[in-house]
Image (cartoon, helix red, strand yellow):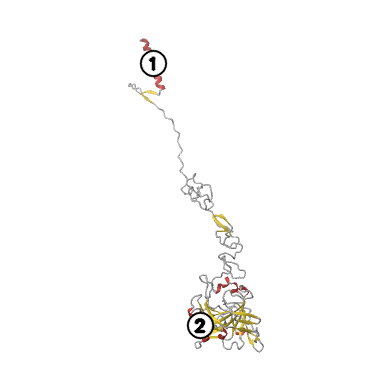
Amino acid sequence: MRKMAYLLPVLALIACEDLDDGKTTDTGQTTGTTETYTPTTPTTPTTPTDPPVDADMDGSFEGDDCDDNDPDVYPGAAEICDGKDNDCNDAIDDGDVLLAVYADMDNDGYGDPFTSQEACNESKGWVFDATDCDDNDENVNPGAPEIYEAGMVDEDCSGTANDMPEWHHEATANGVIGPDDWSMHWPECGGAEQSPVDLVYKTTVFGPGEELDLNYLPSGVHVENVGHTMEYTYDPGSTLTLGKMTYDLVSFHFTAGAEHTLDGARDAMEMQLVHKNDGGTVDDPFDDTFVIVSFLIVEDSFTTNYAFDAALDWGTMAGLTKVGDIHEDKAGMYSLQNLLPPGWIQDGMPAERYDGSLTTPPCSETVRWLVASYPLFLSSSQVTNFTNLYNGNYRAAQDIGKRSVLYTYNDYSTGTGTGTGTGTGTGTGTGTTP
């Protein structure tokens, strides 16, 4: 028993040590209860997190955006042709955004359809257009004016050379070319020997000239509204000979008022008889030469030219109101020679002669003009038959420059043209030909 009394303190001490090892603590209370103590591990203070950055405000944050300084560049952006990787897929201008550009070697703004590369934009020598038909000539492209010329160049790239635009006697409008712009397409219209001219008496030369001979056969009536006048086509076989050169009478037509003026005065109308020598090549208009015999027409209220009415079916003209309208009367044969002023042939066919041009495009300067000294007369109603269809279809007088006007006639006693006097011609204006 005494041994047990000695052991109890030892056992209690051991028990206390075990409790300390188990991290228990005596509360000092007599109840004998214990409390468990768990020490906490000290924590390290954390640094606050920075907010995400979107410098270019494109909705894509730095780290995801491959260029956060460009709002056009971010994942998911549409790729456009601008030299950038817009969609951040590590490829610049991918996805068929490059455009075709075409070589423009002549720098006319039109590209060669057969020479191209890909680019975002046009640059020097490269354009988006691909319609040039000659990239070595700046004067040949779809925007160039077509030029009437023997070289047969297709300036406007239409596929056909010398496919000329419409023209008229009014100001240029709606693609129809007026007299002030004729020379853009028909260069000879701006030449130095254009027609018509003002025939000034005091500067006219009177002297000998080449003999004139007319051989006009009968013809049927064939008249057409050709868009700028009424043109009568004459049957083949009639000729005019001037000197040693013979010309075929091919047609005649009218203008209102007269194209040639006398000391500035303009008559009501003019009839022009067109004779052509084809130079031996029927299909080549560039070697054609012409003699045009012109008759000024005076309006006379008291005179009716019945020959015109009978021979030319003049009254039917009023019905030919549309371009291309035609009237034919092959049975009603007439001789143009019978329509000329009485006495003009018998008196040697006096006329003022000068070198000039056609008065309408192409204004070829290959015309010998003979403006008859005797006029024709038509009544007011006969003039109106024409002017109801065409009025003002004449070209203004052109500068005669250094050319001379020769007044001459056939001297039947010698078989040659003759005349007397000296002088030079002057005049001003602008205009075209038959």
Find disc 1 in the rendering and name its residue: 11
Q: Is residue 33 left or right of residue 262?
A: left
Residue at far top of view: 2
Above or below 6: residue 277: below
Q: Return the residue nearer the eye: 15 or 106.
A: 106
The picture places residue 255, in percent across and down from the top left corner, at 54, 80
> What secondary structure is marked by label 2?
helix
Mark 1 residue element? helix
In primary-sequence order, the first of circles 2 and 1 is 1
Q: Residue at x 38, y 15 (%)?
A: 9
* Residue beneath the point at 56% across and 73% down: 182
Q: Which residue is mark 2?
A: 314
Residue at 40 percent across and 17 percent down: it is 14
Camera-side residue: 116 or 64?
A: 116
Tell me the kind of residue under disc 2: Trp
Proximity of marks 2 and 1: CB atoms separated by less than 8 Å: no
Residue 26 placement (x, y as % from top left): 37, 22
